[in-house]
Image: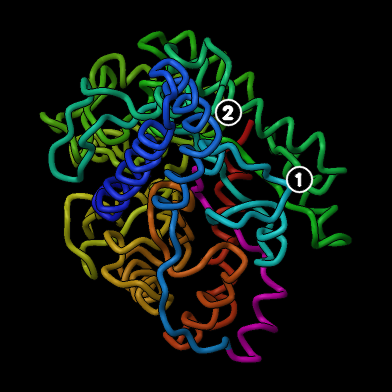
Amino acid sequence: MKSVAGRTAQVKAADSGVRLVQQLLWRRPGGSVAAGLCLVLVAAFIWLPGIVEQNLNGIVATTRKPPSPRARALHARLLVADLHADTLLWNRDLLVRGTRGHVDLPRLQEGNVALQAFTIVTKAPRGMNNDRTDGNRFNLVAALSFLQLWPPETWMSLTDRALYQCRRLEAAAARSGGRLVVIRTRADLERFLAQRVANPELVGAWLGVEGAHALDGNLSNLDRLHAAGVRMMAPTHFFDNEFGGSAHGLVKGGLTDLGRELIRRMEQRGMIVDLAHASPAVIDEVVAMATRPVVVSHTGVQGTCGGLRNITDDQLRGIARTGGVVGIGYFFAAVCGQDARSIARAMRYAADVAGVAHVALGSDYDGAVSVPFDTAHLVEITDALLEEGFSEDDIALMMGGNVRRVLLATFP
């Protein structure tokens, strides 16, 4: 989930909500204040979450050339995997092709996506930004959970909020007639990959969490999330927490004692450590102590796009030494552009520094970002990678083969 790219959109969404409230209150001739307030509440529950999502998760209007026939043919043969999408945050039916946002099952199938990480957001402080975010400010996700009529336990507890999103994915998979498959173990993944050879319409999904604050400060909640299917977690998100520092936090420190214990327990349970949003100190410490591959699920590289959010060459090499991968995001703050060529240039740079075997896709779809295209149009990245001069074998690795390797090496 991003900040700078979404801040203008957040303001627009809030303004839209305010205008809606004003209209409902001021256009009731003779109506009572109580009746007007009731209508405001009804409108908030029915329309406001959709208005917010429409404004936050946009698609940039750009002129794009059609992908080449070679790119289309190659893309159809690929196993495509994406390390990051925050789709579960929004009350859309995953099984229905949406008119807003970036990800749902029909569009995943159109984009030939085989493996999709659904990442869970539990907290987004008001005023969140890339430079300095205070985690103690009002939590916008708590408000969203209330407006979207999530169960009352999700309004206060970050852990319950995460567990509810896990249940949303499971429920969608149960209604999908086998088209959407939740993957929890290495055996699940191997079975899914074998089935998908016969049926390319199948989509495999696994769960991640943005920020260990979702544990509500209690490490025993890691077992609850693991039991619910979570197989990837970042120690921090946009703010420092009791486990470590964020790249965007007030202190930006390293791992705490609790954070080091978290990493050990995650590795024991076959959970992938995700270093997206981690402070430089946390990245260095995790890479040094890791015994399994680690990932950065959605990021840019400072070699093509500067800023605190993006990782350095040394960090790229450190992730590679663990056997892990770096997922390149599609949003402007990650790649300093708004087209597939900008994404491909970042992937070229990362491959030159860390090796082709350590580069992947990390869209950050539905994470309060505007992107050049939704998941139905990932062939545009394949086309751009061909134009960057990558071989078809290298493209197959970066578009999904590397993620498949990490999941097989890490999952319990």
The residue that appears at 62% across and 66% down in the rendered structure is 376
Among all residues in the image, which is located at the extreme front? 30
Residue 258 screen position, x and y as percent:
30, 14
Relative placement, left or right, of 390 versus 196 is left
Q: Which one is closest to the eye, mark 1 or mark 2?
A: 2
Q: Is residue 43 above or below residue 62?
A: above
Q: Is residue 74 magenta?
A: yes
The disc labelled 1 sits on which kind of residue? Leu
Residue 410 screen position, x and y as percent:
57, 38
> If the image is split into quadrants, where does the C terminus sit?
top right
Magenta span: 68-86
The disc labelled 2 sits on which kind of residue? Gln
Would you say the residues marked 1 and 2 are in contact, meaning their CB atoms lie under 8 Å apart?
no
The residue that appears at 43% across and 56% down in the rendered structure is 327
Q: Is residue 177 above or below residue 360?
A: above
Can residue 84 be seen in this snapshot? Answer: yes
Identify residue for label 2.
Answer: 165
Residue 354 screen position, x and y as percent:
35, 63
> If the image is split into quadrants, where does the N terminus sit?
top left
Task: Choose top left, top right, bottom left or bottom right for residue 339.
Answer: bottom left
Residue 356 screen position, x and y as percent:
45, 68
Between 310 and 405, the residue placed more toward the observer is 310
Q: Is residue 332 magenta?
A: no
